[in-house]
């Protein structure tokens, strides 16, 4: 028994226990949005674009250059401060854990999903639209109840891949500082989203960067959902051409196929209709699928945590 405890507390298992602790802390720690450090970068991003972006007067090339420079100006000081603090930190593990906790902000998304589900169950469409508007960029005013459920599930799956699993991936690869830098880059891409006309060119440099950073971890996140829900249905989606058109469609097609529900279709952004390929399963969305999607990402989290624990165990065995 004593040897088992010593093994679990060894250096190889330390990152796993830190990650597990932060996952549970992030899930249950009440941290209002206005007091969260991520909110600060959003305010700076919107202030920056208001100062340097004028789509009516600036040519496309200048907008792209302005977007790239704005990204560098905002991120460089944060990166420098984080690196210096890590270097000076007397307890690096504690510092890394705090950085991961800041970067791993996700539980607002499931909470809003539950609010949407509860409001639709009570036929409170206005309340459901308001809750949904907190987690999606698209227009919600004219959405039908089932349209809201589909938009909610798509946002939940995409944000789980990009906002949660990708943060964990970069933490395991580069530590808490790398995870937080990735999260800041991702938040800038959301603030300057290319789906909005005024950011079509200004947001392109940060979008290209975040696409590179998300490409591999989002695939792993998606495969964990497939393993957790339905391997046979999800694996068939791997061989469909639609899965390889872009990262978004890869996630929606595999996760939708695993859940057996149809995702994709048209959406409105600033009164502009954007068409997305329909993908996933064949069954139309129903309200209970909101809860099924939440359960799916929870099971997927336990899948990759289990795999990571096994990896730590193998690392310990090979280091002996």
Image: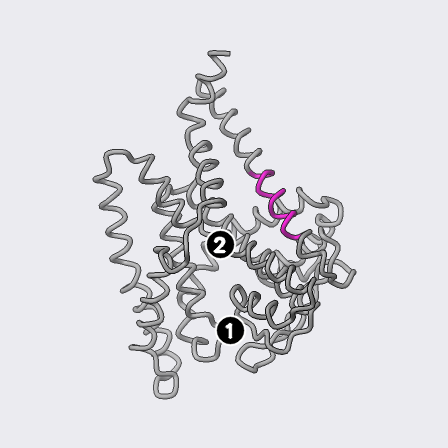
* Above/below status of 206 relative to 102: below
Q: Which residues are magenta?
A: 293-304
> Residue pushed farthest right?
283
Q: Which mark is residue 163?
A: 2
Whole-angstrom CA distance, mark 1 to mark 2, is 18 Å
Residue 209 location in percent, x, y?
Answer: 42, 60
Residue 144 location in percent, x, y?
Answer: 69, 73
> Residue pushed farthest bottom?
57
Number of the front mark, 1 or 2: 2
Q: Main secondary structure of the magenta part?
A: helix
Q: Which mark is residue 79?
A: none
* Secondary structure type for disc 2: helix
Identified at 48% across, 36% down, the residue is 20
* Secondary structure type for disc 1: loop
Identified at 49% across, 52% down, the residue is 106
- Of 190 and 139, nearer the camera is 139
For mark 1, what is the residue?
A: 195
Q: Is residue 107 left or right of residue 282?
A: left
């Amino acid at each position: 028994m004593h040897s088992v405890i010593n093994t679990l507390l060894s250096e190889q298992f330390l990152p796993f226990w830190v990650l597990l602790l932060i996952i549970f802390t992030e899930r249950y720690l009440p941290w209002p949005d206005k007091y969260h450090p991520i909110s600060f970068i959003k305010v700076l991003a919107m202030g920056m674009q208001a100062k340097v972006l004028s789509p009516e007067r600036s040519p496309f090339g200048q907008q792209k250059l302005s977007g790239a420079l704005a990204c560098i100006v905002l991120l460089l000081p944060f990166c420098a401060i984080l690196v210096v603090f890590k270097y000076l930190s007397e307890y690096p593990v504690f510092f890394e854990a705090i950085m991961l906790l800041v970067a791993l902000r996700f539980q607002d998304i499931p909470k809003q999903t539950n609010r949407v589900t509860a409001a639709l169950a009570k036929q409170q469409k206005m309340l459901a639209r308001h809750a949904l508007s907190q987690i999606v960029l698209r227009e919600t005013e004219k959405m039908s109840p089932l349209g809201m459920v589909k938009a909610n599930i798509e946002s939940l799956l995409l944000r789980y891949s990009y906002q949660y699993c990708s943060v964990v991936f970069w933490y395991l690869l580069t530590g808490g500082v790398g995870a937080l830098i990735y999260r800041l880059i991702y938040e800038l891409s959301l603030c300057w989203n290319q789906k909005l006309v005024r950011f079509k060119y200004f947001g392109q440099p940060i979008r290209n960067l975040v696409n590179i950073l998300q490409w591999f971890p989002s695939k792993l996140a998606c495969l964990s959902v497939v393993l957790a829900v339905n391997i046979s249905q999800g694996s068939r989606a791997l061989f469909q051409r639609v899965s390889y058109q872009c990262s978004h469609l890869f996630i929606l097609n595999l996760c939708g196929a695993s859940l057996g529900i149809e995702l994709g279709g048209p959406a409105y952004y600033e009164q502009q209709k954007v068409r997305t390929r329909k993908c996933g399963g064949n069954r139309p969305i129903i309200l209970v699928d909101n809860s099924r999607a939440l359960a799916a990402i929870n099971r997927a989290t336990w899948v990759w945590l289990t795999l990571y624990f096994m990896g730590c165990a193998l690392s310990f065995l090979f280091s002996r």
